Amino acid sequence: MLNGAGEVAKGPVNDTNFGYRDDIEAIEYDPEGAKELLAEAGYEDGFSTTIWTNDTQERIDVATYVQSLLADIGIDVTIQEFEWGTYIERTSNGEHDMFIFGLSLGTHDADYPMHMLFHSDNTGPPGNRTMMRDDTFDEMLYEARIEQDEETRLDMYVEAANYLNEQSPMAFLYHPNEIMGYRNEVQGFWTDASGLYQLKDITIQ
């Protein structure tokens, strides 16, 4: 779907941000296991639901791909597209069943995406559109935010990522690669983790 221009996500951050480590326990693709869980929940014949997306082609493509995967385990998904303003408002209100979203990680630190997307204080418009309210996770984020030792803090965010994967408020799909072209004469050009061009140190040889 991304034509090789991305990587499978293990959690809310990748190796461009502090808080990532290779040993994060990612959720593996397991359709047979998913069918077993559906049967245990009383949905052995599947069910019907909706997935929302705004009207950008990448997210429409993601929604279509997710629709096909869920069809394989008996879940009938209808895709609904919205213009951006309506999409933001209605997902902020929690009106959706499922939705496609993304986040640029400009701070290079796991605190930003984890706090914005999943902390109880941010439920609704501030960013927590899964409406997750979890005192245990809130406390994990607080302790990691105030921790002074870097290695200990890294361990805390790995633990937090594993906790998110266990609770599964969101399916982390992929981290896109930022692709751009420039001539050999351009020196000092780079992009940050959010894909923003960094131009202040550029020279032309």
Image: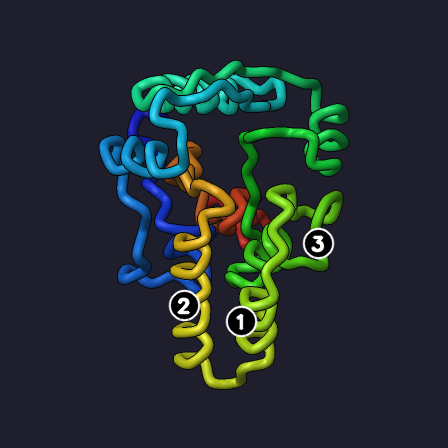
| Snapshot quadrant of residue 166 | bottom left
Alpha-carbon span between mark 1 and mark 3: 15 Å
- Identify which residue, 44 or 85, lies in the foreground: 44
Residue that numbered label 2 is attached to: 159
Dot 1 alpha-carbon crowd within 10 angstroms: few under 14, some 14 to 19, many 20 or more: some
Circles 2, 3 touching at the beta carbon (< 8 Å):
no
Image coordinates for residue 198, horizontal then vertical, percent: 56, 49
Disc nearer the start of the sequence (1/3): 3
Q: Secondary structure at mark 3?
A: helix
- Residue at the (51%, 24%) spot, across then down: 59
Residue that numbered label 3 is attached to: 122
Circles 1, 3 touching at the beta carbon (< 8 Å):
no
Disc nearer the start of the sequence (1/2): 1
Report the colour scheme. rainbow
Alpha-carbon span between mark 2 and mark 3: 21 Å
Q: Secondary structure at mark 1?
A: helix
Question: Quarter holding the C terminus?
Answer: top left
Q: Amino acid at mark 2?
A: Glu
Q: Is residue 160 above or below residue 149?
A: above
Residue 43 visible in the displayed image: yes
Residue 140 bears which disc, if any?
Answer: 1
Horizontally, residue 5 falls left or right of residue 190, namely left
Dot 3 alpha-carbon crowd within 10 angstroms: few under 14, some 14 to 19, many 20 or more: some
Residue 177 visible in the displayed image: no
- Residue at the (29%, 31%) spot, across then down: 35
Image coordinates for residue 109, horizontal then vertical, percent: 52, 63
- Residue at the (39%, 66%) spot, across then down: 158
Horizontally, residue 182 falls left or right of residue 142, namely left
Q: Amino acid at mark 1?
A: Met
Q: For the view shown, which residue lies furthest in the front direction?
A: 42
Question: Quarter holding the N terminus?
Answer: top left
- Identify which residue, 81 or 106, lies in the foreground: 81
